[in-house]
Image (spheres, rainbow, N blue to C red):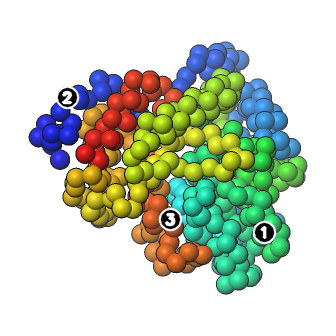
Amino acid sequence: MELVKDPRFIGLVPFEQRLWLSSPTMHGEEQHWVNEAIRTNWVTTVGENINEIERQIAELIGVPYAVALSSGTAALHLAVRLAGRKLYGSSGAGRGALEGKKVFASDMTFSATVNPICYEGGEPVFIDSERDTWNMDPAALEKAFRLHPEVRLIVAAHLYGTPAKMDEIRRIADEHGALIVEDAAESLGSLYHGAQTGSFGDISAISFNGNKIITGSTGGMILLNDGKEAELARKWSTQSREKAPWYQHKDLGYNYRMSNIIAGVVRGQLPHLEEHIEQKRTIFERYAKGLSGLPVSMAPAEADFRTNRWLSCMLIDEEAMCASSRGSEAPSFSPEAGKTCPDEILSVLLQFNAEGRPIWKPMHMQPVFEGMEFVSAAESAVNEDIFARGLCLPSDNKITEEEQTKVIELIRRCFG
């Protein structure tokens, strides 16, 4: 679609500066702690910045132990490996901790949630979402346990910062003697019944990736309740070196420890977590107000949750969807008066120099997981519907009210 020939967009010009989906927001303290690491020559995977952010995050989330790692994916991998070892015992070199075991996993998420299951030789069974939160459906999870009562591990994610129904998921897990790995990568600062996400899993993970609500440019943490497991995670993250003066290894290890420089960036970011959450929530409320009256709804959240609204997401009403389809790499759509679709809106935003994204493509629809089992409690897959009708809007902390008003106007004109 060429906007210059589309009368719906006459009078609007592209943004001079790119509007990002979610980019880092720096404050200055980050540079101080990075400089301190360099000044003191603690630039490797030990140092005061690491010690301090581990302490602060553990205190914030309410867990006894936090181990700083190179990424949220690394944290998820070690969490899954620890859970597998706890459930099934130690595995030999070259064999995963979940070898041949099925694991129930969130279906609507980023692939980093479920890849570690496969790293450890497990087989993910994908669980559909429920519409209240777009997260793992407890009813579908119960159905999955009826199909596979032998399963002992659940990997559950909090989508776009909105908490899953962890009380129901925990109840089901306990009934079946299963452990929970909680993927709180997107939900730092979100509250579920007053408690921080990241505190509900037997082992949990958070992320400091460049687009997250608090960033180190990269990095993540594994959150634990057991001191011995925390020490094992630290050991694994530094290539599983033993205390012998020579390099000796009794277990497989990984180069997963966080750098003290990255930790300095995180240390400078942490005092601004609540500020970032309020900015994100304000952005969401502006969208909700500005898009009212259109055949759309905003991403849900239960009344007794506080979501950090990491990304503001929107769902187009079914009757307002124009004809559209998605190939393996590119979408197609047919504009229609009064109707639109996520890919048309995203195309318009891109041409006006603004970044949006489709909702995460469900894992059971991904070519890499073709043939893997998918369990839904609904007549048709909830996740497939959300993927087809949903999109993520520009949600950067630094978007101005004027810029957001223009994004809203672009979306309104797509329905013209």
User: Real-space Cα distance between discs 3 and 1?
Assistant: 22 Å
Q: Residue at x 85, y 51 (%)?
A: 225
Callout 2, which amino acid?
Gly
- In which quarter of the view is residue 43 placed? top right
Name the spot of residue 314 as percent of width and height, x first: 46, 48
- In which quarter of the view is residue 44 placed? top right
Name the front one of labels 3 and 2: 2
Callout 3, which amino acid?
Asn
Query: Residue 399, can we see it?
Result: yes
Q: Could you tell me which secondary element the residue under label 3 belongs to?
A: helix
Q: Are marks 3 and 2 in contact (CB under 8 Å)?
A: no
Q: Could you tell me which secondary element the residue under label 1 belongs to?
A: helix
Disc number placed over residue 334 in the picture, else none: none
Q: Nearer the viewer, residue 112 or 44?
A: 112
Callout 1, which amino acid?
Ala
User: Real-space Cα distance between discs 3 and 2?
Assistant: 37 Å
Q: Earlier in the sequence, mark 3 or mark 2?
A: 2
Q: Earlier in the sequence, mark 3 or mark 1?
A: 1
Name the front one of labels 2 and 1: 2
Q: Residue at x 47, y 60 (%)?
A: 386
User: Real-space Cα distance between discs 2 and 1?
Assistant: 56 Å
Name the front one of labels 3 and 1: 3
Disc number placed over residue 383 in the picture, else none: 3
Q: Is residue 247 placed above or below 274 in the rendered structure?
A: below
Q: Nearer the viewer, residue 205 or 191?
A: 191
Is disc 2 surrounded by few (<14), some (14 to 19) or many (20+) residues within 10 Å?
few
Q: Is residue 264 placed above or below 213 in the rendered structure?
A: above
Q: Which residue is mark 1?
A: 173
Q: Which residue is mark 2?
A: 11
Is disc 1 surrounded by few (<14), some (14 to 19) or many (20+) residues within 10 Å?
many
